[in-house]
Image: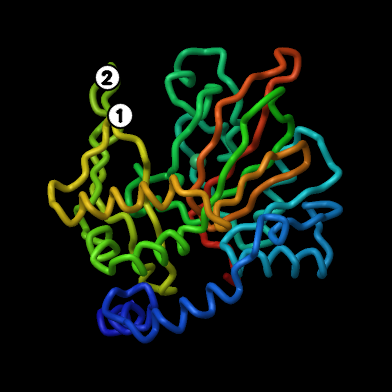
Amino acid sequence: MSAALHRVARTASPFDPDNAGGYRRWRDNKLAACPANVSALMVEIGDPRAPSVAERGALLAALRRANLVVYACGIHAADPDIPRALGRQFGLTRLDRNFLADDDGMSRVTVAGERARGEFIPYTNRPIGWHTDGYYNPPERRIRAMLLHCVRRAAAGGENTLLDHEIAYLLLRDEDPAFVHALMLPDALTIPAREDDDGIARPAETGPVFSIEPESGALHMRYTARTKSIEWKRDSAVGAAVAALARVLATPSPHHHRIALEPGMGVLCNNVLHERTGFVDDVEAPRLLYRARYYDRVAGT
Ligand SMILES: [Fe+2]
């Protein structure tokens, strides 16, 4: 994209802090379309590998309203082709393959027996605070969509709460536009390099929390509520914005969608904010979710 086109896309985005009129129009439409509760975002489907035209339409309608949909199907098989095929229906083909994922980029999220994985929270039964996926990824591996598919639930706990990142942006901008300004600074959040026994396993990543996709004008969010191994820009405006965001996340609202995924259920989203409660496993049948992270955004949203 040329520099001129890039500027046009940026100016046209309602998420540009300087586009007050566009933001107001977008905000009115967003709130008018907002689901009253999570049940408005739930869609039953027969076979995720081949949804009907009506099922596909219902899934897409929820995704357009809230950047997320919760689906439920009657197929409980531990088959990664089920979520993979569903993602493909929505243009999601470019999977992020991290070093803990299985070879095909479809991660099995389950409590790990071996130590290498257990050091990372997703592979334990501990709670996980608010975040978007891939906040430590470099820009060329930006995660725009994410899919979680439940094969087995925990004996107790393991629930997720989801919050559309566009709503988080809206609540912050309504409270004080300076908050979104600060969180759009290109050096707002740094994830320090992570070192392993061989030296540096991942270089430091510095970037904004909120950014605008140059091509689509869509809003991207990069965030973690972690306080260890995180460096926020030493700046009073950023400090105030981070505190305001933490308040938004901690304050229950109709936009906070709490879900307990049962076998055959899943979440497809444009990498919205999410958290997970801790859980207790049935040792005979431990919790198992497939997780896919994509460089693509859900097509048509
Ligand atoms: Fe996550």
Inspect the image, locate mark 2, and give the three-letter code of the amino acid beneath it. Asp
Specify whether 148 is left or right of 284.
left
Query: Which residue in the protein does label 2 denote?
Result: 198
Query: Which residue in the protein does label 1 denote?
Result: 201
Residue 154 screen position, x and y as percent? 69, 26
Depicted 278 relative to depicted 84: above or below = above
Question: What's the mark number on residue 238?
Answer: none
Specify whether 203 is left or right of 159.
left
Q: Do labels 1 and 2 touch, CB within 8 Å?
A: yes
Depicted 196 relative to depicted 80: above or below = above
Q: Secondary structure at mark 2?
A: loop
Image quadrant where residue 66 sits: bottom right
Residue 83 screen position, x and y as percent? 69, 46
Residue 254 screen position, x and y as percent? 58, 57
Inspect the image, locate mark 1, and give the three-letter code of the amino acid beneath it. Ala
Depicted 283 relative to depicted 264: above or below = above
Residue at figure coordinates x 46%, y 49% from the top left? 251
